[in-house]
Amino acid sequence: MKTSLSIREAWSNYYRNDFLRLWILFIITSIGSYFLFRSFIAPDQVDEILAQLGDTFESRGLTFDTSARETMIALFVNNTRVTLFAFLLGMIPLFIPYVFVVINAAVIGLVAMLVGFAGESVVRVIVLGILPHGITEISAILLGAAMGLSLNRYVWKKLRGKETDVTFKALFVAGVKMFLFIAVPLLAISAVIEAYVTPLLLQ
């Protein structure tokens, strides 16, 4: 039984497959939620949804009045919190990491739907407004979820009395290292791009 893991070993043996599956789930959920929202949400409900989203963003320190620096910090803090929760809540045997992925994917679908209702080009907003920062941001969050699933799988095996090939401590410590040295830098890059570059691209 392994009592320690390098970041490379953890990625290759415990995170990579879940990470790839979560990307597939994210893409499918984003596309599916876009069409689902378009089917069930009427145009006269859009203003109410926008108001609710505005309240949500405001509660997270994101408003139209905030500076680029304040926006960058708020984005980094919020996304780091989500990624950390996706990792740590994996210790609860309820497949919570999947919930984080589905919720974030559904938000992308909702935003795309709202863009379409506003008469804007959905493809343009996705390519210029989401992808530049989204690739690194989403990858970091999905990495957190993949690390959470590794803990989740360990807990389930223990509950069913099965043997494991690695200790919980080794998985947890490797996850903390991956979070600090991979996920956090990715989220920092994403926050800078979203706060400073994305507004320029969408002008």
Image (tube, rainbow, N blue to C red):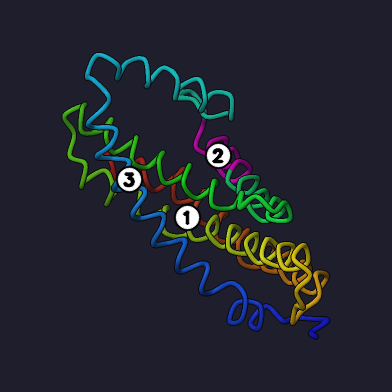
How many marks the image carries: the answer is: 3
Q: Can you tell which of label 3 and label 2 is closer to the viewer? A: 3
Amino acid type at circle 2 is Arg
- SS state under label 3: helix
Q: What residue span does the magenta drawing correspond to?
A: 67-78
Q: Residue at x 63, y 58 (%)?
A: 184
Q: Residue at x 53, y 36 (%)?
A: 71
Say which residue label 3 marks. 129
Say which residue label 1 marks. 138
Q: Residue at x 73, y 72 (%)?
A: 174
Look at the image and say whether residue 76 sits in the magenta stretch: yes
Q: Can you tell which of label 2 and label 1 is closer to the viewer? A: 1
Vertical placement of residue 82 versus 153, above or below: above
x and y, in percent, of residue 93 in the image: 69, 53
x and y, in percent, of residue 52 in the image: 45, 19
Q: Are marks 2 and 1 in contact (CB under 8 Å)?
A: no
- Overall secondary structure of the magenta stretch? helix
Say which residue label 2 marks. 69
